[in-house]
Structures are given as structure tokens and as C-alpha cells.
Amino acid sequence: MYILLKISSLLLFITCATSYTERIPVGVILKKDEHKVIETVINYVSWNQRTNDGQSQFVIDIIKDNVEEEDAVHYQQSICRLLKKGIMVLLAPSTCSVCFSVLATTSNEFKIPLISQELPEFPLDVSPKYAVGIRPGTTRAILDLVRYYHWQDIVYMYDH
């Protein structure tokens, strides 16, 4: 049921996006250390749309907002500023585990798709109904490997 809801919301967004002939405002929340990477991606998307002029049915209008500190209050203020600007989609910061429940709650309340690099694998206070993770989680795959090979001890090193 949960996956069906996620797929249907994504299909609804794609349907709306393809029938929308002007611009799609996408909100991006930036942290202090993410500016250069996100700016590169934004510049690439803008360049790609300019070079394919006339072929795209819609134009992605990226609206950025900066978060000074990584806490719930600053994230909520940033989301409110983006909503005032009329965003249709919200892109979560790459490492937003601290405030993911704030993003998920806002996404659920306003029925705005939330796109994140990966969804947190720990239980949340709020179940994200409109959130989509681009990269699958690794916890289940690692657990399956440990069970399959009957390993008693493992050392797992991961650099996010």
C-alpha cells in the first residue's frame, strides 16, 4: 500500500509536469557546505535546457534557499519561504537526517513531492507519503549478506 501510494504520487507529478507547458518551480534547500556541488548541478540543468530549446515541454525553474543552521526551526522557515515562492517539488539536502521529519511532515501536509538522495532507514515520527529516495538504502543489503554467509563478525566502514 505504501509503495503504491509513492508510485501513484510520482506518476501524478510526472503527469502534471508533462501537461504543464510553462515552468515547474523546484525548491532546493541548501546547507552551507553544499553550495558548490548543488550550483554545479543547477548550472548543468539550466545549460541542458537552453541547448535543447524547443524540445522540452516544460522548464524547470530552480528556486534556492539557504539554511543557516541544521535544526527544525531553520528548515521550517526555509520551507515556508520556498512555499511562498510557489514551489511544486522540494529537493531535500543530501544529509538531512536531523530534520527529515520536518521535511516529511510539510510534504505530507501540503502534498508536495519530496525528493531526497536516500530516505532514512530509521523509524520516523511521521511516515513520508510523498517522499522519493533516489538511492536505495544499504542496510537491508548488508544484513542479507551477513545472514547469507553466516558471518559472526564484520567491520563495516562507510564514508557518507
Image (spheres, grey):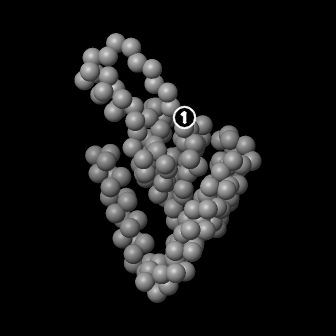
Location of the C terminus (image quadrant): top right
* Mark 1 surroundings: few (<14), some (14-19) or many (≥20) residues within 10 A: few
Using the rendered view, name the quadrant where residue 83 is placed. Answer: bottom right
Whether residue 22 appears in this view of the structure is no
- Residue at screen point 49% across, 54% down: 114
Q: Residue at x 32, y 58 (%)?
A: 8
Residue sitting at x 47%, y 57%? 113
Q: Amino acid at mark 1?
A: Asp
Q: Which residue is mark 1?
A: 159
- Where residue 62 appears, x then y in whole percent? 59, 67
Q: Toward the viewer: 87 or 143?
A: 143
Residue 85 in the image: above or below residue 108? below
Q: Where is residue 141 drawn, in percent x and y?
A: 33, 33
Task: Give whichever of 35, 127 is nearer the camera.
Answer: 35
The quadrant in which residue 27 appears is bottom right
What is the residue that sits farthest to the bottom in this orientation? 54
